[in-house]
Amino acid sequence: MKSNILLLFGFVLLLSNCTRDLSDEATIATFPKNGEVYIDGFSAGLEYLPFGDSYFAAFSVDEETKYAGSSAMRFDVPNVGDPNGAYAGAIFPDYGRRDLSGFDALTFWAKATKKGTINEIGFGQDFRENKYQVTLSNLELTTNWRQYTIAIPDPSKLTQESGLFWYAEGPEDDEGYTFWIDELQFEKLGTIAQPRPSIFDGADVPIQTFAGVITPVASLKQTFNLGDGQDQTISVAPSYFEFTSSDPSVATVNERGMITAVGSGEAVITATLNGVEAKGSARVTVVGNFVSAPTPTQDPSNVISIFSDAYTNQPVDYYNGYWAPFQTTVGQDDININGDNIIGYSELNFVGIQFLVDAPTINASSMTHLHLDVQPREDVEPGDFLTIRVADVGPDNEFGTGDDSSGEIRLDNSKLVNGEWYSLDVAFSELAGLAGRSNLAQIVFVSDATISSIFVDNIYFYNDGGSGPMGPTVAAPMPTQAAADVISVFSDAYTDVDRNLNPDWGQATVVTEVDIDGNNTLLYSGLNYQGLELGSPLNVTGMDFLHIDYWTANSSALNTFLISSGPIETAYALSVPTSGWASVDIPLSAFAPVNLADVIQFKFDGNGTIYLDNIYFYAGGGVATEPTQAAPAPTQNAADVISLFSDAYTDVPVDTWQTPWSVGVLEDITVAGNATKKYSMLTFVGIETLGTPIDATDMTNFRLDVWSPDFTQFRVKLVDLGADNMIGTGDDVEHEVTFDAPARGSWISYDIPLSDFTNLVTRGNIGQLILAAQPENAATIYVDNVYFYGGGGMTPTEPTVAAPTPMENPANVISMFSEAYTDVPVDTWRTDWSQGMLEDVMIAGNAAKKYSEVIFVGIETLGSPIDASGMTHFHIDVWSADFTEFWVKLVDLGADNTIGTGDDVEHEVMFIGPAQGEWISYEIPLSDFTNLVTRGNIGQLILSGRPELANTFWVDNVYFSQQ
Amino acid sequence: MRTPFFLKTYSFPVGIMISSLALALLCISCETDETQTVTTFTNLTFEDNFDTDGSIDETSWNYEIGDGTLNGLPTGWGNNELQYYTDRPENIKVEGGMLHITALKESFQGAAYTSARITTKGKVEQQYGRFEARIQLPWGQGLWPAFWLLGSNIDEVEWPQCGEIDIMEYRGQAPSTLIGTVHGPGYSGGEAVSKEYVLPNDRFDTGFHIFGIEWGPEYINFYVDDVLYNQLTPEDVDGEWVFDHPFYILLNVAVGGNFVGPVGANTVFPQTMLVDYVRVYSRSN
């Protein structure tokens, strides 16, 4: 905020318009409808903020060369490689904001010293959200003054815009030049017409993705026909568009155009801009959950890695050399799925990774093996293959000479399965033809187009030290069930039934039995899938649980299946990898609809190296299947409670206790005469109060009683609809709390502080409660006494105690406001251009500054700037009942001690989600104010609060200190 | 029809020079008379409000089909126009209270575009009066819609002796600019007497506008909406004043040709001219 000439009439109106009760009768703030940006000087509120790495001095005011009036904006583009910044670029914001909704274009006159093409120019950049950014690329300038127009994609969005103008331009043919812009203003031309928005450049783009992966809508454009009859296409920010998913259960899309894959299936993402349907779409195919390659387990000291998130990778020339003219393969190391970096190749015939020219060759002479994980992304037919070739360039570092050698290994459809990782561990000695490995330079994949699409991960050379992969060193835990309650399949502790541990189902898995610490253990190496066949069908209807002990260091996916005749099979996912032995007791109901009287087989699938032990069924030893006692009676004072379901309170209306999209069965039952909700075969259930959302603003806790015979996990999610009271809109917030391994067979009273629902930043319109449990589709839960309550009183709306007394030595402090120190002079604690009100108040006898209805407030020491160069920290105490963000900006006037000049520097520190209802003592290291590179003449302090206009905060003990 | 050069044969530079001169005059006259009366003729003699969905009312209108050769003109209606006119509903229909004349990009009878052109020749003809239509125009480089009149004696005296009054012509690449013109002997084609009107802060393809003339003995007043932007009298034409006999009405959308130049690479098709109504009045009493 360098400009101190911010007095705008609109602000005065605004403040008098605001009522106290913003939450009840929110008045929409209005901002100046001033379209002028630069006519003959900076318009009111305009600032100049160059890009951090640009040539800062590029912009100046020119009073000689101008189109009209007394001056023009001059931009000096530097030469290529200029050490002061190799390009010119800046934003010109007005943080007081403008209402530009009455205009339809930004217009200006421009000329240049030579034919120049401005790389990017537009508006809507504000160094904050850039929510409504517009970019016109490649604007051609001439050496004569000409007028240019940049259309506004949808003016109705720009009711409070800060980003009035921005540009970025580099040298032309390596040479700098100068251009001028004059009469820069937003105008209502009336001739911006024929909108033709598009996404994905107007194409219908197929996107294959996995649940949880976020993909942005790309190439967002708007095309208009301008008044001169010419079309103009601009790149526009997603917030101008409304996005729609044809099936939100497959993929959702938010107001920022981020597509989130949710569940398997197909969904089409489309968009409109100002009511006009955009050309282009995304056809999103979600192919379930992505399974990462097994995590490498080799000790990093024994590894030379080419590509893996698990190790530090060696530099390479490239991950795809695009070898002309015969290579068709595209793609390289550009896939990131939920944080997992992967190489993706498609249209594969052959492709090479090279480390030779820009990166050094690799000396793998102390290594013994090559490892890589590869996953076909399509069905692999007989005859399809993938050959992996390793090439050594020899000591001369040049291919095509006599000292080259290479060796290869061929994988076929017995190893490669669509969608499954194959982990290759091959000894160099098995790569026939590879004469040396001191100058490795290439890894080449060849399929001759038999397999056209693959993922590759974890490419590394390693020394196996003569031992196999890591395994457990201790035995699995000793079972404790009485043998009489057990039917054992694999355990030293019991007598096992007759079974075949390795039926040939065509799997790649290698099965062995190994001795671990004196205990016979089942080992699956290189799991893709593996069966276990029972000698005769087992009747386990008298049993309650399946117990399995398992150990894996590298698996990223592991499922176990029970199979009855048919075959009827059901999977149960095991959490991997483990930390030591993991034990799981799976309720047999989790395997429905498998016939428990006729269990014939087990199956495991997934990946990695898995140790298994103590696989047995057992009878539960008396866990009840339903509660016999009612849930405990609540004790909260009814006045402090908002109850959804309880016999103890009057309940508020609830639209439904089971939305149609729930997965589970609801019954209303009584338990010992007490009304109770019973959910069975549950995955999750939605409970909605959309009709009359719950205002839980004054509540502190959410409470419910739950009883389950079998759940292994319980989750509670709350969804707030936001200010618009509508579900599915951008201001919805939600948070889910998870309880692992809850107690079974007894009532659990969950008393959850609402502060635990971290992301539930608003709770004035709670519209959904979602309860979820594991095992999926199998858990049964009984629910009672669902309510919110307050802590027995209202949340305080103002501080009742004084801010903590500072303890710094006065000799080390420069205080602006504190009763503990002598304060330096401050010009004003609220500049005229502030957006917020100030009252000087007393709190428990202690003076404080109260700021209300705040967007930002300026505090100035221009008259006697503060020399904080010897200080290390900035301190401020702040209390608020309602702010969600608190920002602190410091501005230094630079050596000239004058604001608004080129040597001003500033930095803003933002605190998101600050604690409410208590004094917060911010002790901010001045080093956190990164851009505040000088601090000898601190002239402004700007405090901002959010939500805009709807926050009040009290401030005390504002000082700099040396620590 | 033996006339070798029919109408709307313009040479570009001359036309533009005329226009810019005329524009200068226009501004002065507008400013001196802010309360001008645009129209005075109120006795309705013909109207088509296009209120019945389907094809056009052939008791009032005729189709003109083809590329001009059926009318005895060189291919392209004497102007190197690119369209083939049809009477198919894809090109012309009445729907939703509007006449739709739609130019399509399609290969048809050797032409690259199709469109439609209709006249009231032999059905609605009138000497003097107020002729107006409420129209939303198409847009894009190479589109050339027109609402215009030809002398009913064209078959006897040929063009330009019959006279031509172009109430509305427009180039799709200049979406805010209207051109009103008269052609007669000695002042036809590139020598025609013409004037441009630029719609302030608006354009003709985003909404409906009323295009009209009020025509009496020795004068023709050109107006759009409530703006009278030109008056032509015998003094303004360099030849015989041939506007004292009945004329008939034409509506068409041409594509390409000498007047508008080639179709732009980015011109969007289809393009439709929407006509809300055509009305003709005579002087009252």
Image (tube, rainbow, N blue to C red):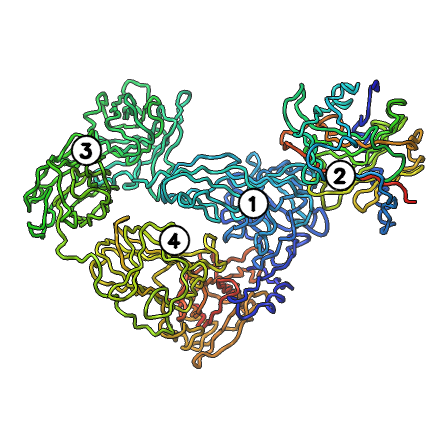
- Inspect the image, locate mark 3, and give the three-letter code of the amino acid beneath it: Thr
Residue that numbered label 1 is attached to: A273
Residue that numbered label 4 is attached to: A659
Residue that numbered label 2 is attached to: B177
Residue that numbered label 3 is attached to: A509
* Horizontal relation, residue A276 to residue A732: left or right: right
- Inspect the image, locate mark 4, and give the three-letter code of the amino acid beneath it: Thr
Confirm whether circles 3 and 1 share one chain.
Answer: yes
Q: CA distance from mark 2 to mark 1?
A: 28 Å
Confirm whether circles 3 and 4 share one chain.
Answer: yes
Q: CA distance from mark 4 to mark 2?
A: 59 Å
- Inspect the image, locate mark 1, and give the three-letter code of the amino acid beneath it: Leu
Chain letter of disc 1 in the image: A
Decide which of A282, A176 is in the foreground and name it. A282
Dot 4 crowding, Cα within 10 Å, few <14, some 14–19, many 20+: some
First reached walking from the N terminus: tag 3 or tag 1: 1
Residue A653, image x, y percentages = 41, 64
Q: Nearer the viewer, mark 4 or mark 2?
A: 4
Q: Residue at x 40, y 24 (%)?
A: A328
Tag 3 near tag 1, CB within 8 Å: no
First reached walking from the N terminus: tag 3 or tag 4: 3
Q: Nearer the viewer, mark 1 or mark 4?
A: 4
- Inspect the image, locate mark 2, and give the three-letter code of the amino acid beneath it: Thr
Tag 4 near tag 2, CB within 8 Å: no
